[in-house]
Image (spheres, helix red, strand yellow):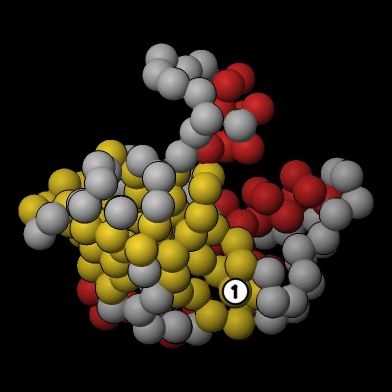
């Protein structure tokens, strides 16, 4: 995929829901049961505000999320221990970041549970077909025009993006 005018990316797991999650009271097993499959993702990070930014700027800017790129091999969440899914983030074939999905609240499904419970406070549900990013387990890698970012997720495959 080619992305125009964005600044950075980071590794995540995307949960594709097969059933509704409606908080409050959603726990890790609920997320695992409701998830049709999990797939590697790169979040494309961008912001309309220049550095230095404050957290209130990022929240006002919709969390600085510009896009996502998904790919690799879909896996059912009970077919592997998602805590141990690793990510190696390359920039132009050089390793820039590494991480484990356990870096997201101890288990990436807990990030989805947190979101379902928070949205439930406002009467909003996560529905089948929704793509939910669980949270980043690598730091942001800043890209410039022409850079290629590739995330290697081991047995889950890889996903990449070129910034043009």
Whether residue 161 is visible here, answered yes or no, is: yes
29 on left or right of 153:
right
Q: Nearer the viewer, residue 10 or 156?
A: 10
Residue 150 vs 64, above or below: the answer is below
Say if residue 103 shows up in the picture: no
In the image, residue 152 lies at what x, y percent?
Answer: 23, 67
**Along the line of sight, the residue nearer the viewer: 123 or 162:** 162
Extreme-left residue of the structure = 94
Q: Residues within 10 Å of mark 1 (few under 14, many from 20)?
A: many
Quadrant of the rendered image containing residue 154: bottom left
- Please state the horizontal and vertical placement of residue 148, each as a whole percent of the image: 22, 58
Whole-percent x and y of residue 66?
52, 48
Quadrant into which the N terminus falls: bottom left
Q: Which residue is mark 1?
A: 16
| Left or right: 134 as drawn, with respect to 81 | right
Q: Residue at x 61, y 32 (%)?
A: 61
Q: Quadrant of the C terminus?
A: bottom left
Say whether residue 15 is left or right of residue 73.
Answer: right
């Amino acid at each position: 995929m080619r992305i125009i005018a964005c600044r950075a990316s980071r590794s995540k797991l995307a949960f594709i829901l097969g059933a509704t999650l409606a908080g409050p009271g959603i726990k890790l097993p609920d997320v695992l049961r409701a998830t049709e499959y999990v797939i590697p993702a790169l979040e494309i990070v961008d912001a309309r505000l220049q550095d230095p930014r404050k957290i209130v700027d990022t929240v006002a800017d919709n969390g600085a999320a510009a896009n996502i790129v998904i790919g690799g091999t879909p896996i059912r969440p009970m077919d592997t221990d998602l805590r141990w899914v690793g990510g190696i983030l390359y920039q132009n074939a050089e390793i820039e970041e590494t991480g484990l999905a356990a870096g997201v609240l101890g288990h990436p499904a807990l990030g989805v549970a947190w979101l379902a419970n928070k949205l439930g406070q406002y009467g909003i549900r996560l529905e089948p077909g929704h793509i939910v990013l669980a949270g980043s387990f690598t730091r942001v890698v800043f890209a410039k025009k022409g850079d290629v970012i590739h995330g290697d997720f081991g047995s889950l495959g890889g996903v990449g993006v070129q910034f043009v």
